[in-house]
Structure formats: C-alpha cells, structure tokens
Image (cartoon, grey):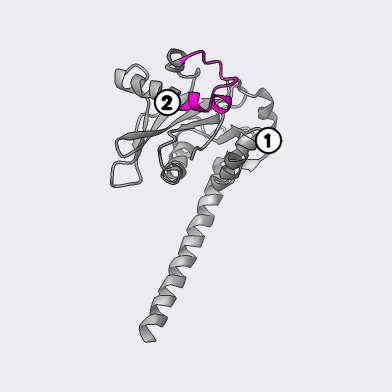
Amino acid sequence: MLLLVRLSGSYLHPLGLLIPLPSPIYNISRCYIFIFSVYLFGDHIRRVDHAADVDRAILRQVYVWAEARSAIYLDGSGYRDAEDFLDPPRGSVVYFVFAGDKPAALLTLIPLVTVRGVYQVGLITNPQASLRKICKLLRGFMGVVFERLAQSLFVDLPDLPEFSRTRKLAGFFGFEQVSETIFLISKYGHAKEREKSHDAADRDDRLHGRVQVLRHHA
C-alpha cells in the first residue's frame, strides 16, 4: 500500500488567502535536528543530512519508489533524475521515517512563501513498508512539528481516482478540505483532534474497566 501525497514544485501563493496570519508571539523559524520515536523497537523519524553519503544513498532509493508511481510523485515536481532529487526544495525540512532499521518513507515540509509558519507536506512511501506503522509514527510526529516548527500544514491532492485513498487518509490525520484540492490542518485544529482522541481513549478505558468488573462478578 502507498500513501500518495503529491510533492509540488510550486508554493501555491493563493493559499495565503485561506490561512489566518500566525500569532506574532510564535516566531520560531529555525529548523530542529532531532530523532523522534514512539516505539521501543527502533521505529523512528529523523532529519535528513543531505551532505551525508548514507542519506544520499537512501534518497536515491526513495527516488526509485517515486519512479514506480511517477504520475503521482514526480509529474510537475521539476526533478529530472535521482541526482536532482538529492537536493531538497529551498527552505524545506526533510525527514526519513524508519521502520526498524529500514527506510519506510520520506517526509518533506516545504514552506509557503506568502505566509510564515505554513508548510506544504510531501510524503513518498516505501511500497514494501507497513502503511499502518507509517501513519502511527506520523500522527505522533505531527505534535512535534506543531510544537517546534509549524502553525499550519497543507497537502495538495487533486480530485482524481489515483488520489482518492489519500484524500480519505487526509481526514484520518485531521486535515480539512478548504478548496477543491487543498486540505489543511492548523496547530489549533491538531490540538482539538488530540483532545478528541484522548477523550475517546478515556471513554474506552472507563468502559473496559466496567466490563472487567462485570466479568469479575459474573
């Protein structure tokens, strides 16, 4: 299975009209180098070092994944070959998603030039990796992104059959459709999604506790 999020070479200037300006209190523009993990068995997300030979080799591997679905991943991206792909989009922050010691996805956050703190999300996944595992890691990682870097995230997903599954997955991550092709989630919206998830987990825990008590007395 593939999570198909298009990497666009443009910055979609009109989107600035749809997004409220970030609070002047939030003024963090620098990029953070850190390793994020929500698992005990080696699954993690880390920043790409574009100068490191090991990371450049992984990027060439990612390009092979993208070539397999070039109509979705590469058309309109401006990349001519794998060597072009080694250089990140200007101003972007790029991460590898690892399932154990194997690369599972490449996550790219590209800044919107017209509104500070807003990033377009690009994701290329390994067709052999577990989509469920990638999604779990990314859901946890979103909190770190909003805490340290972004005010809003958006994806550009055309209303085409090959993107139908991804448009549904955007809802799974809490993105809301704000135009024909643009799906957006804000820092505030993500906080509300987490609050709802925590409330649901609490209800499940309480229900589970009651069921256990009933079974105990049965």
160 over 173 or under it: above or below? above
89 over 106 or under it: above or below? above
Q: Residues within 10 Å of mark 2 (few under 14, many from 20)?
A: many
Q: Nearer the viewer, residue 78 or 65?
A: 65
Which residue of the protein is positioned furthest toward the front in this rendering?
A: 68
Q: Which mark is residue 62?
A: 2
> What is the x, y in percent for residue 86?
42, 17
In the image, the segment drawn in magenta is 65-81
* Mark 1, secondary structure of its residue: loop
172 over 124 or under it: above or below? below
For residue 170, what is the image quadrant? top right
User: Which residue is identified by label 1?
Assistant: 159
Q: Can residue 22 be seen at all in this image of the molecule?
A: no
Look at the image and say whether residue 50 sits in the magenta stretch: no
Look at the image and say whether residue 80 sits in the magenta stretch: yes
105 over 42 or under it: above or below? above
